[in-house]
Amino acid sequence: MDTSRFNQAEQAQINAMVEQKQVTDFMNMFTGVVDRCFKECANDFTTKAVTGREAACVQRCADRFLKHAELVSNKFAELSQTVIFAWGHLKDFVNWKRHGKLQNCVI
């Protein structure tokens, strides 16, 4: 992610927000996988051991979930770039309105 057009404090703030979002997304994904796959696959409670059928079901369930998460993650990364691009142009517009000139404008 190119944040070079922002000052150091803004870059740190953007990086902190991205990191927090990534941690939150990971925890939500992990909790979702555990909950969904347990409900879908764990149905024999007569033994403490996981059956081969349950293990295979959990593997398929987790694979599906992770493929979906990868698609969502890629879309989020794409949208993040758009937001950063738009934010930079908004800053340029505000500078133009305040000072009557554009600084570091890329069109």
Image (spheres, grey):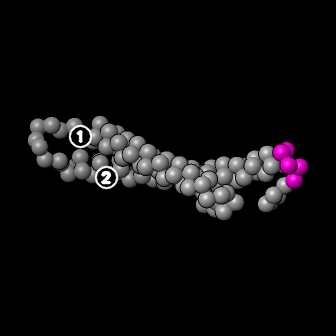
Q: Is residue 96 left or right of residue 9?
A: right
Q: In this view, which residue lies farthest toward the left?
A: 47
Disc 1/disc 2 C-alpha distance (Å): 12 Å
Q: Is residue 55 visible?
A: yes
Quadrant for the C terminus, please: bottom right
Look at the picture and state if 44 lies above or below 30: above
Q: Residue at x 49, y 47 (%)?
A: 21
Q: Which residue is drawn at 22% across and 37% down?
A: 43
| Callout 1 amino acid | Ala
Q: Circle 1 sits on which residue?
A: 42
- Foreground pick, 66 / 13: 13
Q: Circle 2 sits on which residue?
A: 59
- Residue 76's spot in the image, x, y percent? 57, 50
**Circle 2 Cα neighbour tier, 10 Å, few/some/many (<14 / 14–19 / ≥20):** some
- Residue 103's spot in the image, x, y percent? 81, 58
* Bounds of the magenta segment: 97-101
The image quadrant of residue 29 is top left
